Image (cartoon, rainbow, N blue to C red):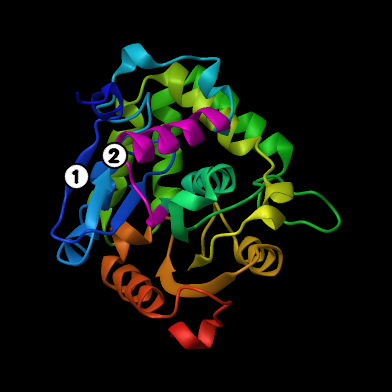
Amino acid sequence: MVSPVLSRNNVKVFGRGTQPMLFAHGFGCDQNMWRFVTPAFENDYRIVLFDYVGSGKSELASYDPERYATLDGYTEDILDVCRALDLREVIFVGHSVSGMIGLLAANRAPELFERLILIGPSPRYINDAPDYVGGFERADIEGLLETMEKNYIGWANFLAPAIMKNPDRPELTAELEASFCSTDPVIARRFAEATFFADNRADLAAVQVPSLIMQCSEDIIAPSEVGDYLSRELPGSTLQTLRATGHCPHMSHPEETIAVMREYLQAPVDGVQSAAQIG
């Protein structure tokens, strides 16, 4: 019997390898955002794509405001997909907020995961003076949420170019903006609240799964201070700063993203690797 999770989360499985590589999209996005990266890994891995409930082509009827009021509901989506497909030794690739969602999943079920690849992750988006720089003041986030509620299209028009950067690639900004606009505004706001008010700093020390932190240059969502903080506080982590600018290197700079991922995956799985070892 086919698990209802596979249709609920619009799960797609392909590739000629056996070890699963599970890709998790960020806020306001969907699995299609991985299309420039996954072909590079199809020959060697079993690629698993999905949409969080409320995103992409997931089943909107399954959306539960209470379940998805925090990142815990999205964490359950990941674990549901892993269990529905009986995945083991998963290489988890998470963009933006999915970095922390994947980390939470690995803390709940470390036996399912072999490595975490975190692209533009942040354990806390709001500054906590004097010791933590997240990139935003609480008033900034509250202002963004208010704009979402009053003028959702205007919010998308403003935020998409700031997140994507790379103004020489306007088609990428247009795609991100269209993705934002295709999401139900009420669901998007709830996901934004769960994302930007989350504080996962206390969850870092418990992580048992080795991880790669891919820090982008000139990233408004996850500035360099966040990458440095994660590198210090996340056990078994490797920090790699990309030349790519913006917050979506898997779309704007897929070649560099693929190269860094490949080097990391070719290194030994156990032990803490240094940045020099992978590039």
Kind of residue at badge 1: Val
Q: Give above or below for 123 relative to 263.
A: above
Q: Which residue is mark 2?
A: 85
Closer to the camera, 78 or 56?
78
Mark positioned earlier in the residue sequence (2 or 1): 1
Q: Which mark is residue 269?
A: none
Closer to the camera, 171 or 9?
9
Q: Which residue is mark 1?
A: 13
What is the quadrant of the N terminus in the image?
A: top left
Which quadrant of the view contains residue 259?
Answer: bottom left
Which quadrant of the view contains residue 43?
Answer: bottom left
What residue is drawn where x is 64% and y is 69%?
231
Closer to the camera, 204 or 28?
204
Magenta span contains residue 74 = yes
Q: CA distance from mark 2 to mark 1?
A: 9 Å
Q: Position of residue 15 (x, y in %)?
A: 15, 56
- Say if residue 146 shows up in the picture: yes
What is the quadrant of the C terminus in the image?
A: bottom left
What residue is drawn where x is 29% and y is 19%?
59
Kind of residue at badge 2: Leu
Span shown in magenta: 72-93
Q: Position of residue 81 (x, y in %)?
A: 35, 36
Residue density around tag 2, few if under 14, some if 14–19, many if 20 or more, within 10 Å? some
Q: Position of residue 190 (x, y in %)?
A: 53, 23
Name, please, the residue furthest toward the right: 130
